[in-house]
């Protein structure tokens, strides 16, 4: 008997989503804790319903065709609407959620937040596969398309397809090697910072092309900062600090992860006059989706706890 749209089930669509993201029925079976034959059966049903092969088999696994890509593009919003209808009575248990959960976090914060999110989510959601990634120049676009579930950045993104919640104010500090001569100063000024090589944290979609706070502040004061390098990877920047007299100005949360090898100092007042806040970005279609709402609340809770630790340093 030929299948049609009346035979389409939400569970089958969820399997399709995971297979699309994982690229194979084997990986999807591991993520969903189901048999590989069961996953293959669900994909076979979808092929019959849509009258299309959907995926092409190759050495690397399954490659989606144009029809599958079109289905996937519209799937997050459709599943979110169905989830909202089901959860209208308040029923939601994160332990029952299945699939790949993608979170993009800007680099200075990632080193501190990724481990605690893994600890929390791996216990609360045993049936998910976490995909934790640094924020890149394409992250906002992927959030708008529903490919990334949640992103964390230092500024909101103006896009009708992206929702945005303020998480917490960003605290930023100066870092230097142990026994650095600047540690003899009780309060470091912007002018004194300019006497040393500076390493700047490079953050996609924010401080490229001379738009960092240090560059702007120095320009307004007629100062010339000695910018030696712009580095996107915080652990590498910390290694550079240890072997030089360079200073860096970055997220206190990220830098605090390296307190055993570097010293942290309060930033000059010229760099603290601008309020910066971490923003939680998510697909607008997922604004009221139960899992995404829960996930955003977990991120805020864990970030608040990290911020509290920084405030008592």
Image: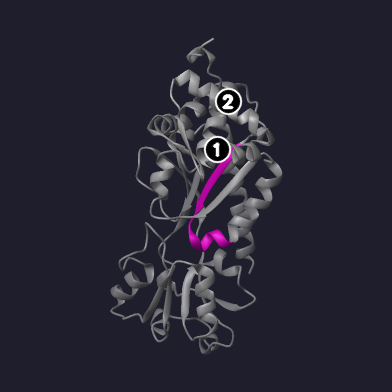
Residue 44 versus residue 242 in the image, above or below: above
How many C-alpha atoms fall within 10 Å of the one at disc 2: few (<14), some, or many (≥20)? Answer: some
- Which numbered mark, 2 or 1, is in the foreground of this view? 2
Q: Which mark is residue 292?
A: 1
Residue 61, given in percent of the width and then of the height, sits at 52, 42
Q: Secondary structure at mark 1?
A: helix
The boundaries of the magenta stretch are 99-111
Q: Which residue was labeled with disc 2?
A: 42
Residue 181 versus residue 61 in the image, above or below: below
Query: Per the image, is 283 magenta?
Result: no
Residue 183 versus residue 200 in the image, above or below: below
Q: Is residue 202 left or right of residue 104?
A: left
- Label 2 and label 1: CA atoms lie apart by 25 Å
Residue 148, given in percent of the width and then of the height, sits at 48, 44
Q: Which mark is residue 180?
A: none
Query: Per the image, is 101 magenta?
Result: yes
The residue positioned farthest toward the top in the image shown: 1
The residue positioned farthest toward the front in the image shown: 59
Q: Secondary structure at mark 2?
A: helix
Residue 63, given in percent of the width and then of the height, sits at 46, 39
Q: Tell me the quarter of the image containing the C terminus.
A: bottom right
């Amino acid at each position: 008997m030929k299948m049609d749209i009346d035979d389409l089930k939400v569970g089958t669509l969820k399997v399709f989503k995971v297979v699309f993201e994982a690229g194979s029925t084997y990986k999807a079976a591991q993520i969903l804790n189901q048999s590989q034959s069961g996953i293959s059966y669900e994909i076979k049903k979808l092929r019959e319903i849509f009258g299309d092969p959907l995926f092409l088999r190759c050495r690397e696994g399954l490659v989606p065709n144009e029809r599958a890509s079109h289905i996937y593009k519209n799937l997050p919003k459709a599943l979110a609407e169905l989830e909202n209808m089901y959860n209208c009575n308040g029923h939601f248990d994160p332990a029952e959620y299945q699939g790949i959960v993608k979170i993009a976090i800007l680099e200075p914060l990632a080193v501190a937040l990724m481990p605690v999110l893994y600890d929390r989510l791996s216990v609360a959601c045993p049936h998910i596969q976490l995909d934790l990634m640094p924020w890149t120049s394409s992250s906002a676009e992927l959030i708008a398309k529903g490919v990334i579930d949640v992103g964390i950045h230092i500024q909101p993104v103006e896009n009708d397809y992206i929702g945005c919640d303020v998480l917490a104010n960003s605290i930023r500090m100066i870092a230097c090697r142990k026994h650095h001569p600047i540690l003899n100063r009780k309060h470091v000024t912007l002018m004194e910072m300019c006497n040393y090589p500076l390493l700047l944290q490079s953050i996609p979609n924010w401080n490229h092309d001379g738009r960092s706070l240090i560059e702007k502040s120095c320009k307004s004061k007629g100062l010339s900062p000695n910018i030696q390098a712009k580095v996107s990877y915080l652990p590498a920047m910390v290694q550079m600090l240890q072997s030089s007299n360079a200073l860096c100005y970055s997220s206190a949360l990220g830098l605090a992860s390296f307190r055993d090898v570097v010293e942290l100092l309060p930033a000059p007042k010229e760099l603290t006059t601008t309020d910066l806040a971490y923003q939680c970005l998510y697909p607008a279609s997922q604004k009221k989706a139960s899992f995404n709402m829960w996930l955003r609340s977990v991120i805020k809770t864990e970030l608040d706890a990290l911020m509290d630790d920084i405030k008592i340093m």
